[in-house]
Image: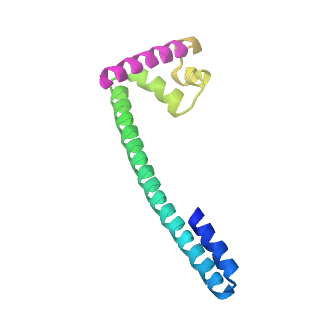
Amino acid sequence: MNQAELDLLVLTAQSGNQRAFGSWIYRLVRWKLTDLLRKRSREDCQLEQLNEEMASNLVENNTNEDETLSTALSRLLDIEKQIIHLFYLDEMKTAEISIILEIPAGTVKSRLNRARQMLKQKYQQLEN
């Protein structure tokens, strides 16, 4: 409430006209609330637009990254794709992969390490 409104409130209260005072207070509160609601509505709209823009950018970035990753994966050798798939997508442990591929666990680890390096290299090539 600004100073002019406060002065008017005091003046109206001192005048003794309680009916006018009540009406004035009602209108003052009503208009202040209306202004506040309008302001919040504008802010909510701006916030909603910003959220939509951010979500759109995030989806677009994720889609581009997914496409780049898929392309990089497709450029790996079959054995590298297989190791990456078993370890990351099927969430198997190196011991389980060694049983499936019938190779020692140490070989699984070294192939997984090489597959990661190759995937990183291919991904970076695609990004540049």
Q: Does residue 50 lie above or below 114 as drawn?
A: below
* Residues shaded magenta: 108-128
**In terms of depth relative to the viewer, which is nearer, 96 or 14?**
14
In this picture, residue 4 sits left or right of residue 117: right
**In terms of depth relative to the viewer, which is nearer, 2 or 79?**
2
Residue 73 in sight from this viewpoint: yes
Q: Does residue 126 lie above or below 27 as drawn?
A: above
- Magenta span has 115? yes
Judged by its main secondary structure, the magenta piece is helix
In this picture, residue 7 sits left or right of residue 60: right
Q: How many marks?
A: 0
Residue 76 in sight from this viewpoint: no
In the picture, the quarter occupied by the N terminus is bottom right
* Quadrant hosting residue 125: top left
Residue at x-position 54% and y-position 25%: 100
Residue 86 percent across, percent down from the top left: 51, 28
Residue at x-position 47% and y-position 29%: 85
Residue 58 percent across, percent down from the top left: 42, 42
In this picture, residue 54 sits left or right of residue 126: right
Task: Tell me which colouring the rendered structure shows.
Answer: rainbow
In the picture, the quarter occupied by the C terminus is top left
* Quadrant hosting residue 104: top right
Residue 68 percent across, percent down from the top left: 34, 31
Residue 75 percent across, percent down from the top left: 32, 24
Residue at x-position 64% and y-position 82%: 21
**In terms of depth relative to the viewer, which is nearer, 36 or 75?**
36
* Quadrant hosting residue 95: top right
Residue at x-position 44% and y-position 18%: 115
Q: Does residue 22 lie above or below 50 as drawn?
A: below
